[in-house]
Amino acid sequence: MRREVKVKITLSEGYEERFTKACIQVARKRVESQEKENHPDPAMPARKVAVM
């Protein structure tokens, strides 16, 4: 049987805004990284992948 646990938290002033900005920044970096992998710069050498 599962018990329901309720928790009440109080965020310090400005925390929610800082947390949201940090999440957006991480997501933006992740998207940029994925775009670089999908569309590599022609000036950069291609990665070699071993086939097993």
Image: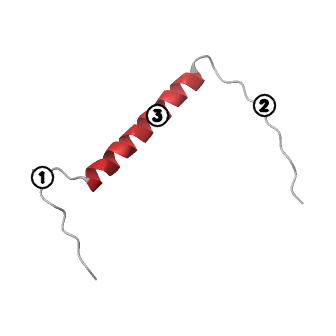
Residue 51 horizontal/vertical position (percent):
25, 79
In this rendered view, identify the residue nearer to me: 49 or 38. Answer: 38
Q: Quadrant of residue 12?
A: top right
Horizontal side of residue 4 vs 25, given as left or right: right
| Cα–Cα span, label 1 and label 2 | 52 Å
Residue 47 horizontal/vertical position (percent):
19, 63
SS for tag 3? helix
Numbered-mark total: 3
Which residue is at a point 46% across and 34% down the rendered structure image?
24
Q: Residue furthest right?
A: 1
Whichever of callouts 3 and 2 sits on the residue coming sooner in the sequence is 2
Q: Residues within 10 Å of mark 1 (few under 14, many from 20)?
A: few
Q: Residues within 10 Å of mark 3 (few under 14, many from 20)?
A: few
Horizontal side of residue 50 vs 6, given as left or right: left
Three-letter code, disc 1: Pro
Instruction: Look at discs 3 and 2 and give the one toward the viewer.
Output: 3
Instruction: Indicate whether 46 appears above or below 49.
Output: above
SS for tag 1? loop
Residue 2 horizontal/vertical position (percent):
86, 56
- Name the residue tied to disc 2: 8
- Name the residue tied to disc 3: 24
Q: Residue furthest bottom?
A: 52
| Cα–Cα span, label 3 and label 2 | 25 Å
Whichever of callouts 3 and 1 sits on the residue coming sooner in the sequence is 3
Three-letter code, disc 3: Ile
Q: Residue furthest top?
A: 13
Which residue is at a point 53% across and 29% down the rendered structure image?
20
